[in-house]
Image (cartoon, helix red, strand yellow):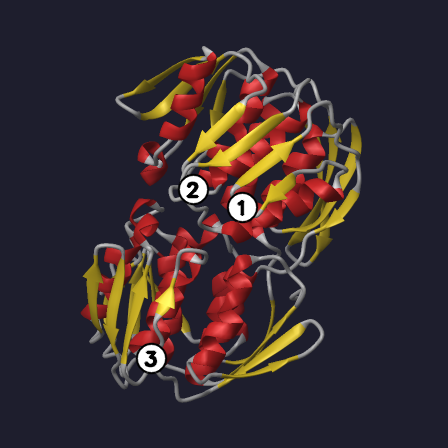
Amino acid sequence: MAIEILPKELNGTVHIPPSKSISHRAIIAGALSQGRSTVGNVMLSADIKATCNALISLGIHMEIQKYEGNRYQIIICGKENMEPVETTIDCIESGSTLRFMIPIAALAGGRVTFQGRGKLVERPLNIYYEIFKKQGIEYRNHDGKLPLTICGGLKPDNFYIRGDISSQFISGLMFVLPLLKEDSAIIMKTPLESKGYVDLTIDVLKSFGVHVENNNYNSFHIKGNQRYIPTTFKVEGDFSQAAFWLAAGALSGRVASRGLNLNSLQGDKDILRIIQAMGGRLEIGDDTIIAHKSSLKALDVDASQIPDLVPIIAVMAALSKGTTTIKNAGRLRIKESDRLKAIATELNKIGGKVSELNDGLNIEGVENFTGGIVDCWNDHRIAMALAIAATRCNKPLIIMGEEAVNKSYPDFWKDYETLGGVLGVSSDGK
């Protein structure tokens, strides 16, 4: 399917969806608790459903209740000693689900097979393979790709891990190591990127009574014999999703993003600094941020800690005065798509001036985009970034594969229309 967007500025208020990153973590922490936990303000995106179903496959009982609008609360009957009730866990296309659940399955023991779809099948897991070899955990994959079958239990250890591939490996271990009988440590072999995501993991674990000692991101000491304490947890708004609406306001109109925690540990909160540094005007209130149409200027961006923001930063940069360089974004080539190639290719189709670097982008600003037909590369963040680009097109923009937003933000198109966006659906992109 394709969606056609008429060039139109966006105005109004969006209730920002709950953080997908925090939702994954809180649901898993609840499942590892011995008792009943409630995780409120959850949006059942495809990725969150994948994590819920993975835990159910390991014997966790959940009750999903309507919360408010299209948001839910999940009642989780957790238990420390999980036992697989199904031999296969389908992670769909969720990298967080896969990399978080592998250590948990190793904690549960038994033989479990992980499978996935799309680009997830080939996303790297070498860090875990190295651990399995060292600890004698049996595993089998298909030429380094999914499906992956593991059998064996994780043991306390000093885990030496690269910090420039994905912070999800560090978070995955952090869920499990506190439950082992002896202390463990995670020691960084290279500087840690995406520190904000590790901060979120440590913070969620703390809410459930589990403590991790952070030694300036060089190492993490984790005492064994800890216990998760059942709790009631409410998920805060997602800055990585708010970034699209904040950009929409800065580029085209006046958009208020409601439901954000200004004291959040989310690394993607840095979008506020970036927009302001580009000349964007923001009104920042208690839980609402209003972005006003502004004349933006180029800004060099180090994306090592904020990789998910790169697609929407690229759209803003492409409509700014001057030339922007985005660097330290090489990991984006192994996401749902090669996001550097995807956003450069699609913006250039509609009049952008974007060139790829090995680990980033070089972007020369233009006044407006032309419009036309673009493809989202089956990537939710590319689809949403292109939708915001449509506000500054001279003619309609047709986005192929618009359903990709369901991965993280199933209400995206509904919210787009709430802000005055005019959408039409086409089956052939013509």
Query: Label 3: how many residues lie within 10 Å, few (<14), some (14-19) or many (20+)?
Result: many
Residue 164, located in which quarter of the rendered image?
top left
State the residue in front, 198 or 243: 198
- Asked if labels 3 and 1 touch by Cβ distance under 8 angstroms, the answer is no
Q: From what the image shows, is residue 418 above or below residue 79?
A: below
Mark 1 or mark 3, whichever is nearer to me: 1
Of the 4 image quadrants, the one containing the C terminus is bottom left
Image point (57%, 30%), residue name: 185
Residue 36, located in which quarter of the rendered image?
top right
Mark 3 or mark 2, whichever is nearer to me: 2
Question: Which residue matches tag 2?
Answer: 163
| Type of amino acid at the residue the image marks with label 1 | Tyr
Mark 2 or mark 1, whichever is nearer to me: 1
Separation of residues labelled 1 and 3 (CA atoms): 31 Å
Question: In the image, 108: left or right of 409?
Answer: right
Q: Secondary structure at mark 1?
A: loop
Image point (44%, 85%), residue name: 279
